[in-house]
Amino acid sequence: MLRAYVDANQHDWDLWCTPVEYAINDSRSAVTGFTPFELTYGHAPASQLDFFVEATLASRRGRAKGGRGATVKKGTTHETARQFVRQLQLAREKLLLAQQQQIAQYDARHKARSYALGDEVWVDATYLTQPGDCGLHKKLLKKRLGPLRVLEVFHSDRQMALPASDRGAPSAYRLQTPKQ
């Protein structure tokens, strides 16, 4: 997040640490519905606007009563503790619900596949270095190789028939999520 605020020369990064930390700790989570600060301390952090509003209200109360405004009690310690426990329980419930939804979404998209000899697959080339890649920018290289024919099936690896230009590369690859 600091990257969005720092100058091009990156000499002022330390000036942005506190505002960025406040922004992160005061951002409400889509999953829990609470900010990290609320889950840690049991209440929302005070902002500059809160201090301004409180001072304005105190001065108005003081004018109406003819003296300094008295501080308003916001609840007892027991009420605050109960609210804090409720927030944590609600956050846990929401996190468990979100985890279950994420598991269901993952399972719906990822199915175990089996491959037979002669099947054609695409191989993820993100971490593959091929002959002729030297000196090229990685972001411009192909993301996948294929279609490659399966020559042999091992427990978790498949051996592919490579094109003639790739004969220097190994022919057995671990396929985590091959594309058909």
Image: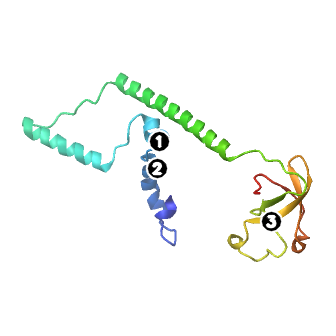
- Residue of label 2: 24
- Tell me residue 118's x, y (percent): 89, 58
Q: Residue at x 50, y 72 (%)?
A: 8
Q: How crowded is the residue under tag 1: few (<14 C-alpha within 10 Å), some, or many (20+)?
A: some
Q: Residue at x 10, y 37 (%)?
A: 67
Q: Quadrant of residue 127?
A: bottom right
> Mark 1 = which residue?
36
Report which quarter residue 38 is drawn in. top left
Q: Quadrant of the C terminus?
A: bottom right
The amino acid at mark 1 is Pro
Front-most of residues 171 and 3: 171
Q: Which marked residue is nearer to the observer: mark 3 or mark 2?
A: 3
The residue sitting at the top extreme is 78
Q: CA distance from mark 3 to mark 1?
A: 45 Å
Q: Is residue 48 above or below residue 122?
A: above
**Residue 56 has which mark?**
none
Q: CA distance from mark 3 to mark 2?
A: 43 Å
The answer to whether the residue labelled 3 contacts the one labelled 1, judged by CB atoms less than 8 Å apart, is no
Task: Please tell me whether mark 1 sits on a helix, a strand or a loop.
Answer: helix
User: Which of the two discs, 3 and 1, sits closer to the camera?
Assistant: 3
**Nearer to me, 104 or 66:** 104
Q: Are marks 2 and 1 in contact (CB under 8 Å)?
A: yes
Upstream in sequence: badge 3 or badge 2 = 2
Write down the quadrant of residue 149 in the picture: bottom right
Residue type at mark 3 is Gly
- Residue where numbered disc 3 is placed: 146
The amino acid type, in three-letter code, at marker 2 is Ile
Specify whether 99 is left or right of 23: right
Question: Element under label 2?
Answer: helix
